[in-house]
Image (cartoon, rainbow, N blue to C red):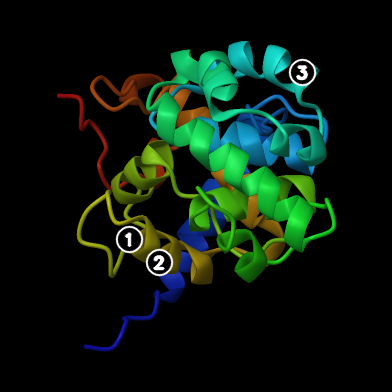
Amino acid sequence: MADRKPTKATKDRAARLYAQLEQLYPEAHCALDHRNAFELLVATILSAQCTDERVNMVTPALFKKYPTPQKMAKATQQKLEELVRTTGFYRNKAKNILGAATRIVEVFDGKVPNTMDDLLSLPGVARKTANVVLGNAFGINVGIVVDTHVGRLAWRMGLLRNARDTKDAVKIEKDLIPLFEQDNWTMLSHLLISHGRSLCKARKPDCENCSLISDCKQKDVSK
C-alpha cells in the first residue's frame, strides 16, 4: 500500500503547532551537554535507555579523562565501563563508544563524520543518534529525531498517518518529514521534547493548561 500524503489541513495544523511551540519554548535546545561533535556523539550513545540528566552527570569525568577520539580509542573497555556504569547497559555502551572512537581515528582521520551513511557505520549509532549529531553538531537537517516524547506527541496531535503506533520511530519520522520545513526538523524535536516534559506527559498530560488544545486530536486524554 502506498504511503498516504498529508492533507493541506494537516500541514496547516502542523505549521500552527510549530509556531505555538516556538513561542512556548524559545530556549529549546539539545539537553545533552557537549562542546563538540565527538562529545555529542558519545553522550547520545550513552543516552539510550537513560535520562539526559544522568548522562550529563557522567560525561564531565568521562571527557576530562578522554576528551578526544584519539585518547578514548586508547582506553580500556573496563575503564570506560567504570565511568559510564550508572547510565545502564554500561558494558554495551562502553564497547560502542570505544568502537566508535577507534573507527573515527582509523577511518575518518580523527574527525566525527558529517554524513548519515558514515555515522551509521560507527558502532552504537543508529538513525536517531545520527540525526542528533548531524542536526545539533553540524547544523545539517537530514531527518527528525524521534524519541518517546516526539512519538507520543505526534500521535496525540494527530500528525501520524502511516505509523500505527508510537514505537515505530522510522515510520513516525517518515510521517513528520512532509509536514514541516526541513530547516526546522532539528528544532522540532527539541520543541516537542520540551512540551512532552513540561505539559504533555505520558501518564498525566496537563490538557487543562495546554495552549495547543485547539489543534490537539487527543484533547482531554488525561480524563
Quadrant where the C terminus is found in the figure: top left
Image spot of residue 206 (x, y percent): 34, 20
Q: Which amino acid does label 3 sit on?
A: Lys
Quadrant where the N terminus is found in the figure: bottom left
Give the number of the mark in front: 2 or 3.
3
| In this view, 153 is above or below 64 | below
Q: What residue type is labelled 2?
A: Asp
Image spot of residue 121 (x, y percent): 58, 63
* Residue in view at x 75 percent, y 57 percent: 106
Left or right: 150, with 184 as reference point: left
CA separation in Å, label 1 and label 2: 6 Å
| In this view, 102 is above or below 57 | below
Q: Which amino acid does label 1 sit on?
A: Leu
- For marks 1 and 2, the one nearer the N-term is 1
- For marks 2 and 3, the one nearer the N-term is 3
Q: Do the residues labelled 1 and 2 touch (CB within 8 Å)?
A: yes
Residue 48 seen in render: no
- Which quadrant holds residue 58? top right
Residue closer to the observer: 219 or 179: 179
* Residue in view at x 40 percent, y 66 percent: 175
* Numbered disc 3: secondary structure: helix
Left or right: 7, with 126 as reference point: left
Residue labelled with disc 2: 175
* Residue in view at x 39 percent, y 22 percent: 88
> Where residue 65 is drawn, which disc sits there?
3
* Numbered disc 1: secondary structure: loop
Left or right: 184, with 150 as reference point: right
* Residue in view at x 46 percent, y 13 percent: 86
Residue closer to the observer: 88 or 143: 88
Residue labelled with disc 1: 160
- For marks 1 and 3, the one nearer the N-term is 3
